[in-house]
Image: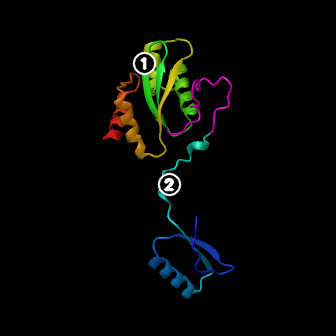
Amino acid sequence: MTTWRPYSASDGLALVLQYLNEHLAKRVYAIVKRSRLPVRLIFRPPPTLKEILTSSRFHEDVCDEEGCRYCTDHKICNLRGAVYLIKRRGCGHRFIGESGRPLRKRLDEHRRAFERPQSYPKNSSSRHGTAVHNRDSAPEFEVVVYTVISRIPFIERSWRLVKSCGDQPEINNREELGEAVQLIA
């Protein structure tokens, strides 16, 4: 990356500005030089299209837990920004959700809600466990990750992807589905 350093005060504070055009850069340079501020001007070029579009998600934490209950074929438990589907074994009912936190933490919350519904009375997973499974053994479910999103505007596209797959989750409550529809609209 090339930077333009037009004016430097040796003991000055570095003032990094984004380079917009030559005219503005010269005006800022003239003002700083005229005012004799103890500032070193540094003009940084704007980000390139490649820098904007390149994802930095390559360095996500990889699951290193032996026998991880969520990572079967793919290492998914540390994904952030995942839109996922939970399918209960036994009844086959499904839940669609999204989380900006590591997926393992969110799935553990679902598991706790299934196991102890009295602790999570408003949670759709706990209501499903109470209504359908009564006092079954520990919940078993499969997880499918539809997509991983890195920015909020992509949530809309992700929910459209989920809807286009034809999934009508049985466990989500009306409010959650309403929120999803609002994201799409």
Q: Nearer the viewer, residue 131 or 119?
A: 131
Give the percent coordinates (x, y) of residue 152: 44, 45
Q: Nearer the viewer, residue 106 or 7?
A: 7
Q: Total of numbered circles in the picture?
A: 2
Q: From the viewer's perspective, is residue 172 above or below residue 16?
A: above
Q: Which residues are magenta?
A: 61-81
The residue under the point 47% across, 21% down is 87
The residue under the point 48% across, 82% down is 27
The residue under the point 55% across, 33% down is 103
The magenta stretch spans residue 64: yes
The residue identified by callout 1 is 93
Task: Give amino acid for label 1.
Answer: His
Which residue, as the protein is rendered here, is positioned at the far bottom? Answer: 34
Give the percent coordinates (x, y) of residue 123: 46, 27
The magenta stretch spans residue 35: no
Q: Residues within 10 Å of mark 2 (few under 14, many from 20)?
A: few
Tag 1, which secondary structure? loop
Which residue, as the protein is rendered here, is positioned at the far left? Answer: 185
Q: From the viewer's perspective, is residue 152 above or below residue 50?
A: above
Principal secondary structure, stretch drawn in magenta = loop
The residue identified by callout 2 is 50
Q: Nearer the viewer, residue 176 or 6?
A: 6
Could you tell me how far apart the alpha carbons at marks 2 and 1 are, in whole angstroms?
A: 42 Å
Q: Quadrant of the N terminus?
A: bottom right
Q: From the viewer's perspective, is residue 39 above or below residue 114?
A: below
Q: Quadrant of the C terminus?
A: top left
Give the percent coordinates (x, y) of residue 58: 58, 43
Q: Nearer the viewer, residue 154 or 180?
A: 154
Task: Give amino acid for label 2.
Answer: Lys
Tag 2, which secondary structure? helix
Of the two numbered discs 2 and 1 on the same chain, state the one appearing first in sequence. Answer: 2
Q: Residues within 10 Å of mark 1 (few under 14, many from 20)?
A: some
